[in-house]
Image (spheres, rainbow, N blue to C red):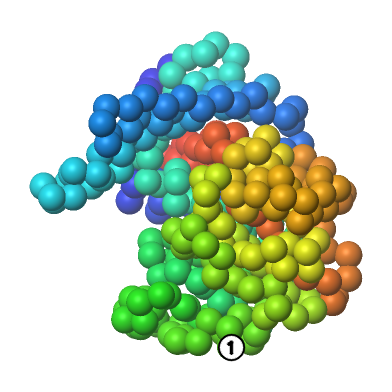
Amino acid sequence: MTLTIIPFAEGERHLDWLSLCAAFQAGHDRPRAEIGDTFLYRGEDTLLNRAAWIDGLGIAVKSATIFPGNATEGVPTVNGGVSLYDDASGVLEAIVDFHLVTKWKTAGDSLYAATRLARADSERILIVGAGAVGRSLWQAYRAAFPKAQFAVWNRTRARAEEMAAECGGIEGSGDLEAAVGAADIVTSATMTTEPILKGAWLRPGQHVDLIGAYRPDMREADDEALRRARIFVDSYDTTLGHIGEIKTPLESGVIARAHIIADYYDAPRFQRQSEDEITLFKNGGGAHLDLMTSRYILDAWRAAQ
């Protein structure tokens, strides 16, 4: 078996957001993934390995180095790659660019949830956070909601205006409460540790997509938002006990375990039930989604050759 190496630009050329959603659906029709994370440290530097094995789909090991000091040398602080192994033989099939997998996994995860939880007639989408993930979300959501109008809010107004200009047709917003109230879909990708999205701002029929929080001390939405919404996660295994967005309100009794309606492995329950309910999705990522994304990228690469 010839080893395939897939760089970012060359790999992305063959990808499509809705096809990735279909790959997620097919991946979750298989047996539940075995997953495991390991961390190694040297001072401020970190090596993170995330591994997943899905019977019939193969094995992926996503390795990331996080070296904060690189910024002073003009070198990216996060580097890495994804090693993809054949399911039948364990032979290394491909090495895929870390940033390519991460971009498409993260935004695709949120998009897949929105295709099941957001109202199909959603016309206004608010992106909270004007970083790289915010730009990826703009690309992804347009695939399923091509007629929607977009707005972006960021703590630093200048960054929101910069993204609005870069992504043509996006409106920069300076009032978060008003922007949330006007949106049919709110997708948030910030690094905040204190909730910035208030449940009191939400209205019936909205879909809230939370991406940014990934540590136990991080949250983007307050308790009231969780109380008012029907809550969904991409994976019970990678969210309930690990991410503050869900972990903290569960431990404090704000919500009970029964409030978490479904993850992707429970497809019949993972859907909107009425036009006026508020749905809330926690995007936790997870190595199994890296595996599904990497396999999709490799399949698309091979099909294009």
Query: Alpha-carbon neighbours of circle 1 within 10 Å: few (<14), some, or many (≥20)?
Result: few
Q: Position of residue 72 (x, y in %)?
A: 13, 50
Q: Position of residue 10 (x, y in %)?
A: 34, 47
Kind of residue indicated by mark 1:
Ala
Give the residue drawn at x 55%, y 11%. Answer: 89
Name the one closer to the observer, 88 or 272.
272
Name the one closer to the observer, 182 or 43.
43
Question: Would residue 8 appear left or right of 205 to someone viewing this image?
Answer: left
Question: Would residue 78 appear left or right of 223 to someone viewing this image?
Answer: left
Give the residue drawn at x 67%, y 28%. Answer: 33
Of all residues shown, which one is farthest toward the left?
73
- SS class of the residue under badge 1? helix
Q: Position of residue 74 (x, y in %)?
A: 13, 51
Question: Would residue 63 appear left or right of 220 to someone viewing this image?
Answer: left
To which quarter of the image does residue 79 belong?
A: top left
Q: Looking at the picture, does residue 129 appear above or below residue 172?
A: above
Residue underneath mark 1: 178
Q: Is residue 109 visible?
A: yes
The quadrant of the image that shows the N terminus is: top left
Q: Looking at the picture, does residue 80 appear above or below residue 120?
A: above
Of all residues shown, which one is farthest toward the front?
252
Q: Is residue 26 visible?
A: no
Give the residue drawn at x 79%, y 68%. Answer: 228
Question: Would residue 153 appear left or right of 7 to someone viewing this image?
Answer: right
Q: Looking at the picture, does residue 101 appear above or below residue 189?
A: above
